[in-house]
Amino acid sequence: MPDDQDPVETKENNRDQDANSEQLNNLETINKPYNGNMISFKSEGIDISVTPDHKMFAGFRKVEDKKIHLEYKVVRADSLLGKSNFHLRKNAI
């Protein structure tokens, strides 16, 4: 894999039953020592603590043609601090 390619965002063409979703396979596991504060996310079905640089698959509310939908993207956990307009999927951590 080229050094400039982000393995978390590498997409493989695996579709599940929902035509609007795409399955991404984990291509890398990072295991490193960490000393510092953790960021916690707790809601219905989710109760996790992650490092600030942890990549999260978050959906953000978007309005188009008077309809609300979620636009998912991979973001750092610390970029979600103080925000309330996002959704974390239970099966995408």
Image (spheres, rainbow, N blue to C red):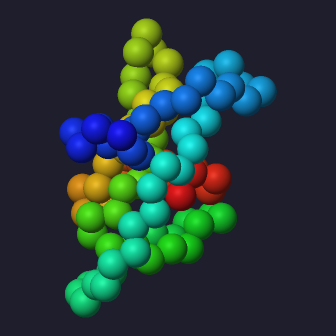
Residue 66: where, in percent of width, then height? 45, 15
Q: Is residue 72 visible?
A: yes
Q: Nearer the viewer, residue 54 or 61?
A: 54
The furthest residue to the top: 65
Q: Quadrant of the N terminus?
A: top left
> What residue is at 39 percent from the left and 44 percent from the top?
7
Q: Position of residue 20 (x, y in %)?
A: 61, 22
Say which residue appears at 56% left-offset and 73% top-offset.
47
Relative image position of residue 85 (x, y in whole percent): 38, 46
Q: Residue at x 45, y 69 (%)?
A: 41
**Going by the image, does 35 lie left or right of 87?**
left
Q: What residue is at 33 percent from the left and 78 percent from the top?
A: 32
Q: Establish if 16 lies above or below 59.
A: above
The answer to whether one can see residue 39 in this image is no
Q: Position of residue 40 (x, y in %)?
A: 41, 75
Task: Examine the rendered structure and indicate whether residue 63 appears above or below residue 26.
Answer: above
Find residue 19 and report its image quarter.
top right
In the displayed structure image, the side of residue 33 where residue 62 appears, left or right: right
**Is residue 59 shown above or below 47?**
above
Furthest residue in direction right, as rendered: 17
